[in-house]
Every structure is written in structure tokens, then in C-alpha cells.
Image: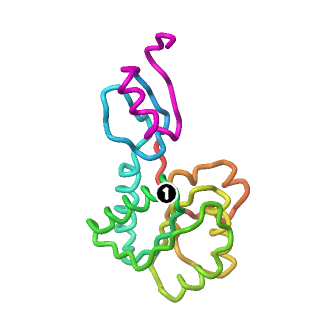
Amino acid sequence: VDGVEVIIGPTWFGQVAMPIAEETKTVMLSPSTGVTVQREKYFFNLWPTERQEIIPLVQHMRKQDVERVVVLYSQNDWTVSMKDNFVEESLKQDLEIIKMYPLVPGEDDFRTIITQIKKLNPDAIYGAFAFYPSQGSFSKQMKEMNLNLTLYSTSGTENPELLNAYTEIEDTIYPYPI
């Protein structure tokens, strides 16, 4: 309407904005699209894709001799995409997913899941959490219940509020673009 040629944004809603950019032939530079959208002529995601985040994480797990993993993931678009990419790359790297736990976004009581994980005896846990309180609560309860496994997670772990509110998150391994 106003003859704008370039838009910086949006964050997290790339799947909605991308068709608008293509239709209006307006360049959009998204700092982070959320769920990765396909490559297009006018829409650009400046944050690494889910796949770009997952590949080195799984490679690191294999270098640490991780073979059996439990996966937790919140049920929203981004974390489901992270989980799907993790599972796909794990299969390529011969990493066995022994159980997956879908979570309600914002869930904060993980004692039952932690008890089940202990019985499964995995080498590590991969957790894609939608909101930081869930990840912090999981890490805290994991330590309280003496579940001494490495938690691997997403770049969302690099959240100052999470790190300040939950010191138990400190040993989480996660990729983060530098």
C-alpha cells in the first residue's frame, strides 16, 4: 500500500508472511521464521533452519557414543519440526529413539516421565521445549530425581530468563549460532 520495498520481519510467523512477500513482490528479511518455510524469491530467513541446528547436534551425540535416546517435545509447530528433524537425522546416524513423549506447551510436572525414562535406561535425552519454564522445570526435576543423563536441546536454551531462573539447566548441550 505504501510502496515499501523491504520489510525486516516478521519473527516466528514466516509460514504466514512468506506467501504475502511472494504475492506483493516485497522483500522480507526475517530474523527467525519459526517453522522453516521453503526457499522463495522474496522471503529470507536469517536464522539457521531446524535442520542446520539438528545435524551438528546429532553428530556431537554420536561422537559422545550416545546410541539410545528418549525424545521429549512440546506440541507446537516449531518443536514438532525440531523433533521431526531430530528423528530423521538420528535415523541417518544410527541413533536409536527408544521412546517419544509429546508434551503440552507449558507443562511443568515431569516426575512420571522421569520415572519412566529411568526404567528405559537411555544414553541421553533430547528435549525440544516450547517455552522456557517447561525446560527449566524438567531440568530441575531431573536433578531432584537423580536422573543423571545429558539433556540435549534446542537453541532456545540460550534464553537469559531460562538461565537465570533455573541453574539446573547449566549442563544442557545445545547448538547456538555464533
Highlighted range, magenta = 1-26
- Circle 1 residues within 10 Å: few <14, some 14–19, many ≥20: many
Residue position marked by numbered label 1 in the rendering: 79
Q: Looking at the rendering, which quadrant does residue 168 occupy?
A: bottom right
Q: Position of 119 compared to 36: left or right?
A: right
Q: Is residue 15 a member of the stretch shown in magenta? A: yes
Residue at 46 percent across and 53 percent down: it is 175
Towards the viewer: 83 or 152 = 83
Q: Position of 71 compared to 87: left or right?
A: right
Residue at 35 percent across and 68 percent down: it is 62
**Residue at the farthest left position:** 92
Residue 19 location in percent, x, y? 39, 32
Q: Position of 113 compared to 51: left or right?
A: right
Residue 107 location in percent, x, y? 65, 66
Q: Is residue 6 a member of the stretch shown in magenta? A: yes
Residue at 68 percent across and 68 percent down: it is 108
Q: Looking at the rendering, which quadrant does residue 88 occupy?
A: bottom left
Residue 26 location in percent, x, y? 40, 20
Towards the viewer: 65 or 20 = 20
Q: Is residue 175 above or below residue 25?
A: below
| Residue type, numbered disc 1 | Thr
Q: Secondary structure at mark 1?
A: helix
